[in-house]
Image: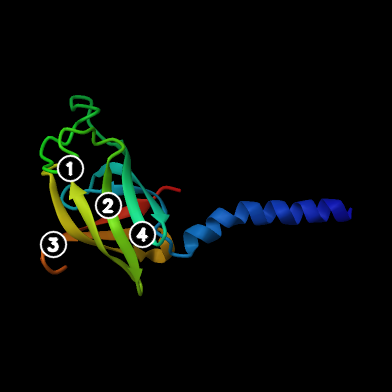
Amino acid sequence: MRTFINASLIAAAVLAAPLAWAQDGSPVGLWKSIDDSSGKPTALIRITENQGELTGKIEKLFRTPDEDQNPKCVACTDARKNQPILGMTIVSGLKKDGDEYKGGEILDPKNGKVYKSKLTVREGGKKVEVRGYIGMPMFGRSQVWLRQE
């Protein structure tokens, strides 16, 4: 009986761990980006953390059947020029600063431009607001990304 109770407690803890992790407000995980003008999903981005710095890579693109399913970043001007967008790092250098992550950059593969970036976790980790800007944050635009796992 005691073994069954111990096993049950361990199983409950293991099953509850991802839920607790998602509720802690961490931006680490898989996110669905939503276009700020159309409201449609555009991509799945995996955010990881390495030594306190966030990085985001595109894992999936939501494309219509008539669109290129594996497009390249033809508008990019750095080392990503003509590289596949799938697997591309588009978010880098974000570091925690109070309730936000700041000091990073975000690439818009549509126009190839790299913007300063900040990220804010919302609704207990269910959403993140990602802002790309030039100069100051007030001169930019935001997208809301939805947690997928």
SS category of the residue bearing label 3: strand
Tell me whether the residue at label 4 lies in contact with that at label 3, contact meaning CB atoms closer than 8 angstroms: no
Judge by depth and name the residue closer to the eye, 47 or 13: 47
> Which circle's residue, 1 or 2, is located before the other in the chain?
2
Q: Secondary structure at mark 4?
A: strand
Label 1 and label 2: CA atoms lie apart by: 11 Å
Closer to the observer: label 4 or label 2? 4
Circle 2 sits on which residue? 91
Residue 129's place in the image compared with 148, above or below, is below
- The tag earlier along the polypeptide, 4 or 3, is 4
Real-space Cα separation, disc 3 to disc 2, in angstroms: 16 Å
Q: Badge 2, how many Cα within 10 Å: few under 14, some, many 20+?
A: many
The tag on residue 53 is 4
Provide the secondary structure element on which disc 1 rests: loop
Residue carrying label 3: 140
Q: Name which residue type carries label 2.
A: Val
Which of the pair 71/39 is nearer the observer? 71
Amino acid type assigned to the residue bearing label 4 in the image? Glu
Q: Which residue is mark 1?
A: 109
Residue drawn at the location 16% of the way across and 36% of the way down: 73
**Local SS, label 2:** strand
Q: Position of residue 49 (x, y in %)?
A: 41, 55
**Residue at the far top in the pictured view:** 66
**Residue neighbourhood size for the residue with mark 4, other residues' Cα within 10 Å, grouped as few (<14), some (14–19), many (≥20):** some
